Structure formats: C-alpha cells, structure tokens
Amino acid sequence: MLKYRLNKKVIKISIIRGELQMKSILYRLVVILLLCLSTAAFGEVIDYIMATVNGEVITYSQFKQRISEIEDAYREVYSGEELEKRLKERGKSGLSDLIEECLLFGEAKRENIKVDKIEIEKMVNTAKSKFKSLENFYRALRNEGLTLETLEEKYKKRLMIKKIIQFKVNSKVRIEPYEISQYYQAHKKDFLEPEQVKIRQILIKVDDDEETAEQTAKDILKRIKGGDDMTNEGEDLGFINVSELLPELGAAISELKVNEIADLVKTQTGYHIIRLEGRKLSKVRKLSEVRDEIYRILFSRKADSIYVDLVDKLKKKADIEVRKR
C-alpha cells in the first residue's frame, strides 16, 4: 500500500551518506581499500605509467581499477545527478588516493607490519561469497588479469595499510568525557527528533476509473466510521516523521486526536482512509542516548587531522613524480 515515506533504500542512503560525511578522509580510504573483488572488466586498456612513488610505479590500469572500486561503493550510496557529481569529484582525486596508498604501504613495510594468512583467507572467502559459483569468481579474476595469488597479495597490501592507519592514527586518538558534553551542548539542534505520527491506512488507488475509486473509498470510510474494525483492512505504517508525509496527509493528521479517523483524503496516489494511532512530539535526545554517536564524530575529526599530518610528513620525505601523458 503506497505511502509517502522514505523507503528502506532511501533510509539506507541517508544513513550511509551521513557516515561518508562524518568519517570523510579515513572512511573513504579504508572502505575503498577493503572493497571485495569488483566484477568490472575494462576490456583492452592501453597502459602507461601515471606516477612513481619512491620508485613504485602507479599505472593507468591501476587508476582505472580504483575508479571502478569507487563507483561500486558510491552506487550503494548515491544515485542520479548526485552520483555523477560525487564520481566526478572522486575521479579527480583517484590518483591522489593511489599515491597515499603507496606511501602508507611503504610506511607499513618500514614498521614491519604483519598480516596473518587467516585474515587474507577471510577476505578471499568474502569475495567468493559474492559470486553464484566458484567458476564465476575465477572468471572475474581472469577478466581483471588476476590470479588467486595476486588477489591475495592485493588483499595483504590493503590489510597492511589498514593496520598502519590503526597503529599510526586511530590508536593515537583520545576523546575526553568533557569534550562529548561540550559538543552536545553546542549541537543540541542536531539531536532534535522530529514529530512523528503512527498511522493506519487504507489506500484505494486510482486507475482509469476515478469515479469508481472515489465511491469505493467513500463506502469503506462509511463502514469504518460506522463501527467496522479498520485493523483487519488497514496497513500499519508505523511511526513516520510528519515532515515525510504528503502535504494532504500531513494537513489531515494535524487535526486528529489519537484513534480518530480523518475524512477521505485525495492525493496523487489515490484515496486515503487514515486513522491516527499515536503521536510523538518533537524533542531533543538526551546526552546518554547520543554519547556514542558524538564519540564517533569527535573520533573521526581527530583521526582525520592525525591522518592528514601523517600523509603530509610521508610526502615531504618521499620521491614522488606525477607524469603527464
């Protein structure tokens, strides 16, 4: 039954988008690094060297692979014009990502970072699980010019980078309790829960015969208001933010008390018979409810700052050459 509320996909997008903004630099790097095997195939690519970092070569094919991985991640989060905008932004920084990866991998080797074979096997098994069969998995490897051994080396490198970030960045972040309290007091508006209503609805869609749909809706409404139980006919939409309702439904709901039934509501989706079953007024969430959320925000900010400093130091010591074609 149609309703004007964020569907699960949109909710997922809004949540993940928040994570992308919150975790920013480190989030985009680590997530891209730990993406499992992409199924993209580029066809024939004329390869060439785009850059060198302390003698390590970065090729055009590596760059294209990275862009493909970014696309895979972003398509889970964005769509339409927003997706194109984000991909354009990230495409420009794809080479920078690879340079940073080389620098971090070199630092991981200098720090003698170790990766257990079990960790690599776990990533390989996760990649395999995304395919319907092992045959499809190995076909994808061949399409990307990989073998199982080269894939394992790829994952080993990425795990080493993740560990050097944990060692040099995350482990150095400290969040004091007073910082969480200060952030809460300064950003209370960010923790405002909007007004919500719990609705039960019967929707009569309008196809070709609007007159029949309207009469059917009126007959059902008359029965319901006459004492028939709406529970067996209506759909429980649960609690919905008032701001997410169609304007016509929002206006009808605003006049109701709990357990009251509105007059027939006509929208672009059809005729609605709605009963208000609950209402939650807007309120600011308590500090105890958002403490972990604030901790993650502050952690990400500090980790980003430490990460930027680390990369800047590595760049100053490195021999980096970006070649123009």
Image (spheres, rainbow, N blue to C red):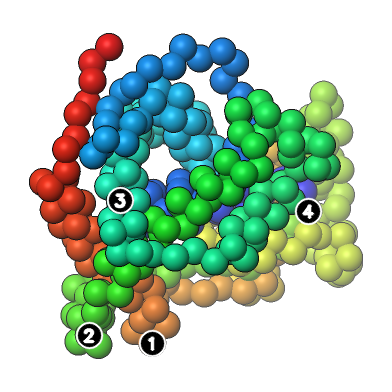
In primary-sequence order, the first of circles 3 and 1 is 3
In primary-sequence order, the first of circles 3 and 4 is 3
In this orientation, does residue 5 appear? no
Total number of numbered discs in the rendering: 4
Q: Find numbered disc 4 in the image and state the secondary structure of the residue it sits on.
A: strand
Q: CA distance from mark 3 to mark 4?
A: 62 Å
Amino acid, disc 3:
Gly
In primary-sequence order, the first of circles 2 and 1 is 2
The residue where tag 2 is placed is 176
The reply to whether dot 3 and dot 1 touch (C-beta < 8 Å) is no
Q: Nearer the viewer, mark 3 or mark 1?
A: 3
Amino acid, disc 4:
Ile
Q: CA distance from mark 2 to mark 1?
A: 15 Å
The residue where tag 1 is placed is 288
Counting other residues with Cα less than 10 Å from the Cα at mark 2, is it few (<14), some (14-19), or many (20 or more)? few
Q: Position of residue 194 (x, y in %)?
A: 43, 66
Q: Nearer the viewer, mark 3 or mark 2?
A: 3
Q: CA distance from mark 4 to mark 2?
A: 51 Å
Q: CA distance from mark 3 to mark 2?
A: 33 Å
The reply to whether dot 3 and dot 4 touch (C-beta < 8 Å) is no
The residue where tag 3 is placed is 106
In this orientation, does residue 172 appear? yes
- Of residues 71 and 202, the one nearer the viewer is 71
Q: Which mark is residue 202?
A: 4
Name the residue at 10% across, 46% down.
Answer: 316
Counting other residues with Cα less than 10 Å from the Cα at mark 1, is it few (<14), some (14-19), or many (20 or more)? few
Counting other residues with Cα less than 10 Å from the Cα at mark 3, is it few (<14), some (14-19), or many (20 or more)? many
Q: Position of residue 239 (x, y in %)?
A: 61, 67
Q: Nearer the viewer, mark 1 or mark 4?
A: 1
